[in-house]
Amino acid sequence: MSTTDLPASHAELMDGVYRWQRHIYDLTRKYYLLGRDRLIAGLDVPAGGTVLELGCGTGRNIILAARRYPGARFFGLDISAEMLETATAALAREGLSGRVTLARGDATNFDAKALFGVESFDRVFVSYSLSMIPGWEKTVSAALAALSPGGSLHVVDFGQQEALPSWFRKLLRGWLKKFHVEPRQSLRAILDSESARVGASVRFKTLYRGYSWLAVSKIAI
């Protein structure tokens, strides 16, 4: 999908939300986007492997992953031009521009070959993006379709806070709504059904009493 084909309303919304927030995004989000570093540690990227992040935002996660797996090649996709501007600058500061390729695109419908010149990936990860993407179920399908045999999809996002007090859940939901974020109640069911459709196995973990959900879907070799 080319830049001109992007869904204008959502792309414009994300650019509007993050035009100024991107400058303080990483500083503030570290306090409540829990489980991201655990996801990165669990990627277990093979030597010379390829890794795609959907919804790469400011580049925070992809930079940490690139440091942890220095032999891998990384690719990042985001619908927000504002976020990609910040990510591009961050990668240049870290000296990672040669190992990480970024592109603007829709995570629900993307052509990896056209965007990156890569047919498929050993790892695809999505960190706190499904809760912001309209039609997020299509992102799960697209991510699984982009995996190489033996590859895996790694997802971390807000859970349903099922073991936390109701007052906390209400406050959190109200706060997240200001940023167009909605925890996906059917996340586990969609991951299970889409993984079963392509013959992938799923490991699902509840973190911090349901504050976050962490899942890995692995394609058979």
Image: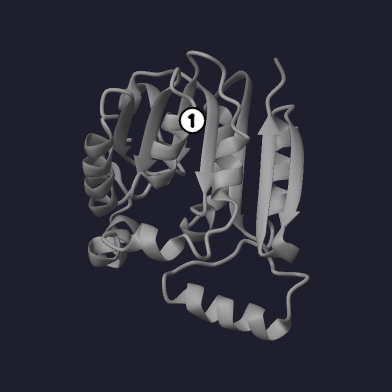
- Residue beneath the point at 67% across and 48% down: 214
Q: Is residue 52 above or below residue 118?
A: below
The image quarter in which residue 15 lies: bottom left
Q: Look at the image and tell me whether residue 4 can be seen.
A: no
Is residue 5 depicted above or below 122 in this figure? Answer: below
Q: Is residue 183 toward the left or the right of residue 204 in the image?
A: left
Task: State the residue at coordinates (56%, 29%).
Answer: 145
Task: Give the residue at mark 1.
Answer: 68
Q: Is residue 197 visible?
A: yes
| Residue 65 left/right relative to 158 | left
Residue 105 x/y as whole percent: 33, 41
Q: 167 or 103, which is in the foreground?
A: 167
Q: Residue at x 26, y 43 (%)?
A: 90
Within 10 Å of the Cα at label 1, are there few (<14), some (14-19), or many (20+) other Cα atoms? some
Q: In this view, does 110 lie above or below 57?
A: above
Coordinates of residue 155 in the picture (x, y in percent):
60, 45
Percent coordinates x, y for residue 127 in the rendering: 52, 48
SS for tag 1?
helix
Total numbered labels placed on residues in the image: 1
- Give the residue type at disc 1: Arg
What colour scheme was applied to this rendering of the protein?
one colour
